[in-house]
Amino acid sequence: MISYKDLGLVNSRELFAKAVKGGYAIPAFNFNNMEQMQAIITAAANTKSPVILQVSKGARNYANQTLLRYMAQGAVEFAKELGVDVPVVLHLDHGDSFELCKSCIEYGFSSVMIDGSHLPYEENVALTRKVVEYAHQYDVTVEGELGVLAGVEDEVSAETHTYTRPEEVEDFVKKTGVDSLAISIGTSHGAFKFKPGQKPQIRLDILHEIEQRIPGFPIVLHGSSSVPQDIVKEINQYGGKLVDSIGIPEEQLREASKSAVCKINIDSDGRLAMTAAVRKVLVEKPAEFDPRKYLGPARDKLTELYTHKIINVLGSNNQI
Ligand code: G3H
Ligand code: 13P
Ligand code: ZN
């Protein structure tokens, strides 16, 4: 058993309480490799923002859980070298079983998500409760989910949204003991959320009803990429073939982050930014074969994107 506390990591409890009061959201960015981790930490240090490093089941399979944990541990030191003591949470994204959550906790994660949102309500309650009971023994915080997002979540995909039912949240939070709750109010996973011409609108009315039922309780938004059109254009300009699509408008996320929404998950926009930078280098310099020459610019573009998100979308800058 490795405790995250010995690794210099923190759980999400205090960060969320402060974010809810302060009207901003903590960035939760996914990482699978060193360049993503460096970009996330550089953006967080430069803006003085706390940060959540998220690891999906897919990331674990790709990069190995132990290596990712060492990277997160190193991230704390890396931030200090950049001159800022950044609070870093190492979080399991979309945990789908008790065993996976337990394993991450034993390997030094400070926070886990148990995603029982596809299960019947009582089964979701029972599974989430079981994870909370285990996690809290080690002061690891737990995120649960109610309602189903459209799009692809790891290996599970749903055609349409099932919005979170506000009448269920109080009972769920009470019965499970979760520390935060992911809700479904119109965001969705992936880079193909809406067709151009559609008018994405997150359901702030549902969010506000939920907030009235569980005042001050930390709320999480998944699927919050905005699919920046200039980046999609750049990918296609350099040989990509992405179909036109739009994401969640950044102004709507900024609005949501002023409420009890205290964690916003962004992954796809980062993937798009890195892809655009890599494509540009490989097209403009076809003789290049040193990975540092295309991963370096990809890292820079990702740092720029995440700096923008932290300041203009989440409002979490200058919170350390
Ligand atoms: O919600 C899913 C995240 O974007 C992680 O995606 O499962 O492909 O690593 P992944
Ligand atoms: P996006 O696909 O919109 O970036 O969402 C990521 C996410 O919710 C990770 O859990
Ligand atoms: Zn998600």
Image (cartoon, rainbow, N blue to C red):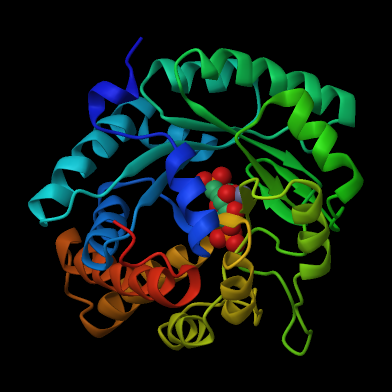
Where is residue 244 drawn, in percent x and y?
65, 82
**Vertical relation: 254 (above or below) 187:** below
**Vertical relation: 168 (above or below) 150:** above
Where is residue 194 drawn, in percent x and y?
74, 75
Residue lying at 78% horizontally and 62% vertically, measured from the top left: 208
Q: Quadrant of the C terminus?
A: bottom left
From the viewer's perspective, is 18 left or right of 182?
left
User: Which residue ends up furthest to the top in the rendered image?
Assistant: 1
Residue lying at 14% horizontally and 41% vertically, measured from the top left: 77
Where is residue 210 drawn, in percent x and y?
79, 53
Closer to us: 221 or 271: 221
Residue 153 visible somewhere in the drawing: yes
Q: Quadrant of residue 261?
A: bottom right
Tally of marks: 0
Where is residue 71 drawn, in percent x and y?
25, 38
Residue lying at 73% horizontally and 50% vertically, measured from the top left: 183
